[in-house]
């Protein structure tokens, strides 16, 4: 195993020594914030890791990549990629007691760019994530009525019929695309700000500000609710779902293994990416949270526990989601079948109870042989339950279209709607805490604001700036921008930062020093598993995923899907090429954080060079005041 | 004597047989007339009550879909009830005395679907135009549905679309109310946190000021010759750097 480490002079000066840490611990002279208790810390980390992706990305991946068989690459990569990276971030934060910028500058001043990159990524992702939360809030506000507004089409102005766009698609589609987003047909038509979404955006940022106004002091209290409520709601939905017809079909469909999918490299790539993004690594938030811990906290055990909880939550949420999807698919199947039966009964004037689901096939065959022209004119649809189940949807489509439709078919729909969207709100909000932490702490470390400004003011300013920038997500084409950010702002830079993190800790900080640190902190040296994964396995996995991602993203055509009522296959979404200027935006989104690492290193290197040239004649000498040889540090 | 029997039999024939024969002939004629009339009437109705007739409306009834187990059997009595209800509708809409016999039903199927035509009460050969019937049905549609415990979907008049109920539109208000409530809570929370934070800060500065004064007292007691030094019994003491040479200070 490679044991070399790059030369790193002056490292001892930049990092606090063991004695100093012990002193800080016992005397509590540190004015750094602290967790009230271990539960707050664990709940905050769990809340940060468990987010909307667990609910609407994992079930889709699971179902589309071979169901139960997807668990194998997922669990393997969880163990070899997720857990080691998590332990690394926890340990380095706890040891160096600083946020992301501070930690990487301590390891080597030229690595400050890594902290800046984390900050930029947290900022960009926080921008669009909170806009999704605003949409969730809109649905919560509208769930307090019976019947739910997305359960039936609205009427035209003169009450003669239903709105055409709604009739052609479906009430839930119409409500999402027209009444909520009022979406334009392409990213070029920006349109105007939708005032109702603006109100929801104000609400979202206001809630976030109130919860993060004093850092972990306030978020620590908020996570008691935001991190535990989702599990409660998931359990309620599971119990409700299992009593509905067809839910077990959905769960069986989800977990039926298709082992041949394991030979498809995309499965492994998606599993690796999902593990990585699901753990919210490389955002810088986890490092900050860990740095508020006591210095002898057992970070190894924390990392394992949080990984297990995260994996378990993904599987649990997938079960719940697919039980409800199974119910919806069964309802659609029954409706389709009954429609066919009704058409046949009406066309041939058979008695009502003659044609049932049992004898449908024989009777259809008989009718087809006797009067095929009438049967053909009826336009009977083929109803296939498996086909309906495999119409996998992910992302906002799953939550706002598929799930809302399923909810309208359940009795007491407003209650289920409120529960579901409050769960999504809590999941999103607890992830936003980590994002804000990942932006605020670097901003403080970089000393962008004067020191005497109170923390509340700085937090308020950052929230305000983000609020104004988020206007781009509430215009008519806002959803297209959201998809753009979702695809490109997070993926590539995070992979680069994570890879650099591992290299920095293992080879620049020194794996030996890191091992000793952990031994001092938790009492025993990390065993062979950690050594192997930190040094070789995890960086290798990150590199492979990064290269594959880069190749795929660069080689594919830049397209996006639009809602276009004039499209010939409406209500299917039309796939359209991005206009040229979007490529520039993509380069900005993905490139700026990634390039922050080398550019900052270069900038600092050049600045150092200039300074060394200037100050060649002077030799720094430390003159220390002493009385009788006693050094008075206290004054 | 023979002449008497001849005379009495002639009298019987005159008095009894002829009237009887006349009566029966009359009855026969009447019956024949009636038969002809109904035959003619029936053929007249069948002229305009058939599957593609421009005067006939098709009705489709789905009893099982509406009532399930409690579905009643569609028999002649139900058919009569239907005719009576249509006649009621026609009376209400046109203010003319329609009868059950003016509603003619034909082409019944097992589906429970049939065609019906309404004729003018005075003239059996004149069926009413479709529009008049449509108007009447539309007017009494809710009563019609109720009469049979069905609804717009299960009692279908093909060609007469049910009028859609107008939507009530106060829904804009509901979400604004919820939004207002939540924003109010947020503002209250913000104010509460600010006040608590301010109070804590004042408490902390007061406490630290007291601590500073304590420290000052402690340190003031050790001032001699204007040089203040911390009394050694209060702290752990310091390494005398002169006795333990540190690389930093003594570089020979």
Image (cartoon, rainbow, N blue to C red):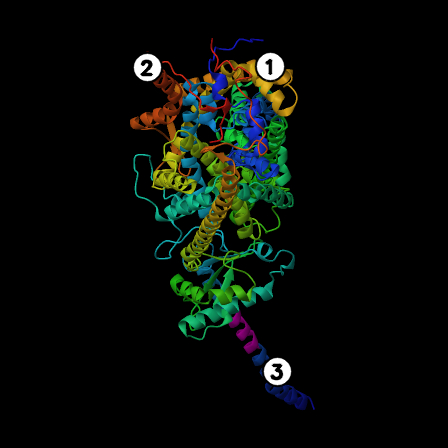
Magenta highlight on residue B27: yes
Q: Which residue lies furthest to the right in this view?
A: B1
Observer-side mark, 3 or 2, equals 2
Q: In which quarter of the image is residue A477?
A: top left
Looking at the image, is A57 positioned above or below residue A148?
above
Magenta highlight on residue B8: no
Distance in Å between CA atoms under marks 2 and 1:
44 Å
Mark 1: give few (<14), some (14-19) or many (20+) Cα within 10 Å. Answer: some
| x and y percentages locating residue B12 in the rendered image | 63, 87
Q: The magenta stretch spans which residues?
A: B25-36
Residue A267 visible here:
yes
Decide which of A582, B251 is in the foreground and name it.
B251
Give the number of the disc on residue A615.
Answer: 2
Give the number of the disc on residue B17.
Answer: 3
Q: Mark 1 points at which residue?
A: A532
Report helix, strand or loop for mark 3.
helix
| x and y percentages locating residue A309 in the rendered image | 61, 33
| x and y percentages locating residue A145 in the rendered image | 49, 55
Left or right: where A36 falls relative to B179: right
Looking at the image, is A625 positioned above or below residue B180?
above
- Counting residues from the start of the chain, the first of labels 2 and 1 encountered is 1
Decide which of A312, B84 is in the foreground and name it.
A312
Q: Quadrant of the N terminus of chain B?
A: bottom right
């Amino acid at each position: 195993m490679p044991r070399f480490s790059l030369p790193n002079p002056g490292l001892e000066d930049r990092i606090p020594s063991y004695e100093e840490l012990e002193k800080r611990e016992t005397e509590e002279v540190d004015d750094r914030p602290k967790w009230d208790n271990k539960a707050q810390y664990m709940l905050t980390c769990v809340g940060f890791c468990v987010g909307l992706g667990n609910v609407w990305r994992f079930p889709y991946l699971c179902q589309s990549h071979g169901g139960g068989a997807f668990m194998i690459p997922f669990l393997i990569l969880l163990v070899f990629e997720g857990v080691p990276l998590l332990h690394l971030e926890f340990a380095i934060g706890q040891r160096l007691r600083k946020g992301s910028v501070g930690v990487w500058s301590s390891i080597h001043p030229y690595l400050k760019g890594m902290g800046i990159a984390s900050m930029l990524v947290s900022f960009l992702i926080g921008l669009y994530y909170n806009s999704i939360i605003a949409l969730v809030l809109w649905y919560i506000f509208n769930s307090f009525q019976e019947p739910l507004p997305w359960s039936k089409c609205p009427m035209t102005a003169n009450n003669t019929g239903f709105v055409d766009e709604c009739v052609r698609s479906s009430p839930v589609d119409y409500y999402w695309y027209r009444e909520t987003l009022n979406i334009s047909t392409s990213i070029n038509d920006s349109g105007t700000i939708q005032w109702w979404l603006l109100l929801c955006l104000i609400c979202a940022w206001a809630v976030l500000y109130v919860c993060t106004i004093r850092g972990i002091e306030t978020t620590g209290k908020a996570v008691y609710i935001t991190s535990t409520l989702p599990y409660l709601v998931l359990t309620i939905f599971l119990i409700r779902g299992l009593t509905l017809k067809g839910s077990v079909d959905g769960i069986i469909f989800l977990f039926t293994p298709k082992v041949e999918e394991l030979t498809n490299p995309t499965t492994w790539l998606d599993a690796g990416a999902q593990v990585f993004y699901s753990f919210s690594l490389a955002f810088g938030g986890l490092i900050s949270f860990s740095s508020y811990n006591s210095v002898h906290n057992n970070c190894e055990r924390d990392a394992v526990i949080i990984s297990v909880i995260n994996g378990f939550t993904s599987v649990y949420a997938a079960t719940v989601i697919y039980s409800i999807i199974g119910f919806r698919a069964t309802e659609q199947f029954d409706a389709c079948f009954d429609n066919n039966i009704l058409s046949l009964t009406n066309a041939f004037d058979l008695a009502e109870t003659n044609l049932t689901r049992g004898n449908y096939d024989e009777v259809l065959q008989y009718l087809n042989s006797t009067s095929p022209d009438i049967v053909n004119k009826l336009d009977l649809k083929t109803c296939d339950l498996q086909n309906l189940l495999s119409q996998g949807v992910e992302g906002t489509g799953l939550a706002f279209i598929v799930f809302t439709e399923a909810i309208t078919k359940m009795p007491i729909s407003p209650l289920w709607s409120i529960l579901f969207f409050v769960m999504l709100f809590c999941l999103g909000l607890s992830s936003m805490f980590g994002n804000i932490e990942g932006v605020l702490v670097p901003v403080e470390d970089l000393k962008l604001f004067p020191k005497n400004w109170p923390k509340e003011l700085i937090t308020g300013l950052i929230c305000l700036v983000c609020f104004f920038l988020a206007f781009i997500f509430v215009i008519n084409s806002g959803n297209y921008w959201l998809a753009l950010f979702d695809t490109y702002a997070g993926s590539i830079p995070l992979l680069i930062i994570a890879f650099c993190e591992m290299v920095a800790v293992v080879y620049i900080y020194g794996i030996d020093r890191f091992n000793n640190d952990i031994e001092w902190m938790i009492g025993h040296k990390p065993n062979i598993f950690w050594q192997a994964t930190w040094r070789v396995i995890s960086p290798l996995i990150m590199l492979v995923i990064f290269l594959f991602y880069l190749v795929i993203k660069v080689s594919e055509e830049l397209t996006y899907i639009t809602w276009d009522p004039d499209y010939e296959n409406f209500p299917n979404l039309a796939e359209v090429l991005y206009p040229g200027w979007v490529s520039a935006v993509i380069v900005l989104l993905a490139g700026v954080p990634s390039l922050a690492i080398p550019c900052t290193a270069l900038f600092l290197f050049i600045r150092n060079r200039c300074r060394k040239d200037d100050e060649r004649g002077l030799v720094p000498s430390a003159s220390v005041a002493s009385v009788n040889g006693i050094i008075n540090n206290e004054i | 004597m023979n002449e008497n029997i001849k005379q009495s039999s002639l009298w019987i024939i005159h008095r009894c047989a002829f009237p009887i024969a006349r009566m029966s002939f009359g009855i026969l004629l009447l019956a024949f007339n009636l038969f002809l009339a109904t035959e003619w009437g029936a053929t007249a109705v069948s002229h305009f009550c058939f599957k593609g007739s421009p005067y006939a409306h098709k009705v489709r009834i789905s009893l099982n879909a509406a009532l399930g187990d409690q579905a009643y059997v569609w028999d002649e009595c139900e058919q009569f009830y239907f005719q009576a209800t249509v006649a009621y509708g026609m009376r209400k809409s046109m203010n003319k005395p329609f009868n059950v016999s003016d509603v003619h039903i034909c082409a019944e199927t097992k589906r429970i679907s049939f065609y019906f035509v309404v004729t003018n009460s005075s003239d059996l050969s004149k069926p009413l135009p479709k529009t008049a019937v449509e108007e009447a049905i539309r007017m009494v549609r809710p009563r019609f549905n109720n009469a049979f415990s069905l609804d717009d979907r299960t009692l279908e008049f093909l060609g007469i679309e049910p009028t859609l109920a107008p939507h009530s539109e106060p829904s804009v208000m509901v979400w604004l109310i919820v939004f207002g409530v939540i924003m109010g809570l947020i503002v209250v929370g913000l104010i509460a946190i600010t006040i608590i934070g301010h109070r804590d800060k004042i408490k902390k500065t007061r406490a630290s000021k007291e601590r500073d004064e304590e420290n000052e007292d402690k340190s003031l007691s050790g001032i001699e010759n204007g040089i203040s030094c911390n009394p050694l019994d209060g702290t752990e003491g310091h390494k005398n750097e002169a006795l333990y040479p540190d690389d930093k200070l003594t570089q020979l």
